[in-house]
Amino acid sequence: MKITRKIFELEKKKINIPVFELTYKNCYKKMVKFCKESKKYIYDFDDTGNTVGLYCNYKKNHFIFIYKDITLKTKLWVLLHERGHYLCNKNKCSCLNKLQRHEEHATIFALKYLLNNNYDEALFDYIINMIALTLNAEESLHARAYSKIIKMKLWQKCCDYLDQNYKKEKLLNKGKNKDGK
Ligand SMILES: [Zn+2]
Ligand SMILES: [Zn+2]
């Protein structure tokens, strides 16, 4: 399944809690501040250290914020990752008292979801690259969580999925070329 704006909107609706996409950095920063004050929050960075998404639990209300000026691929990844944070919070998961585990769970949720919903290889290509970049960047909570995840069977599944889809695509293109000639 290819990621389009329509699909992204559908994924937003599935979560059943408010999801805000914020346009301006200032506005986004204000939200980060607000969530910090609420004390139950978790925010996520990309490999360059910019905040791209945030999950917040304020007086038993759950919110997700996503920075608007990022690509659709990043947005979907962030959305699913924040959804993972939300589900762990909602279900009072044992990971909540250990931040690294919390990050692991959110990422595992997002990867499983993408696999189960047959998202296209371009998305896996992006995620695998993004995780590699984070692992090579400075020491961080995400890097530590990812270093655990890349040792899991789930990670191998994602890599295999990417390989298989690339092979399929190549075969398809070969077929097309033959027909063309
Ligand atoms: Zn959890
Ligand atoms: Zn996170």
Image: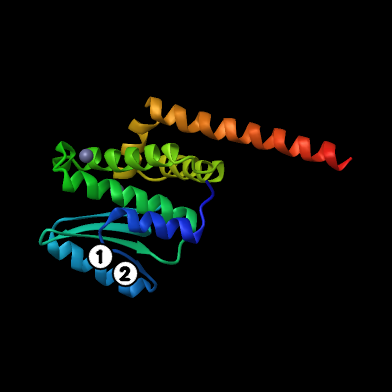
Give the answer, above or below, for where 74 lies relative to 106.
below
Horizontally, is 54 left or right of 162 in the view?
left
Residue 82 position within the rendered picture, expressed as x and y whole percent measured from the top left:
30, 51
Q: CA distance from mark 1 to mark 2?
A: 6 Å
Instruction: Out of 175 and 76, give the one closest to the viewer.
Output: 175
Q: Find numbered disc 2 in the image and state the secondary structure of the residue it sits on.
A: helix
Instruction: Decide if residue 43 is on the left or right side of residue 124.
Output: left
Tell me the quarter of the image containing the C terminus.
top right
- Residue in the image at 38% along x and 64% along y: 67
Mark identifier at residue 32: 1
User: In this view of the protein, which residue sits in the foreground, 128 or 63?
Assistant: 63
**Rendered location of residue 159, percent (x, y):** 50, 31
For label 2, being within 8 Å of ligand 2 is answered: no
Amino acid marked by disc 1: Val
Specify few, some or many for label 1: CA neighbours under 10 Å numbering under 14, 14-19, or 20 or more. many
> Residue 168 lies in what quarter of the image?
top right
User: Label 2 belongs to which residue?
Assistant: 28
Coloration of the structure image:
rainbow
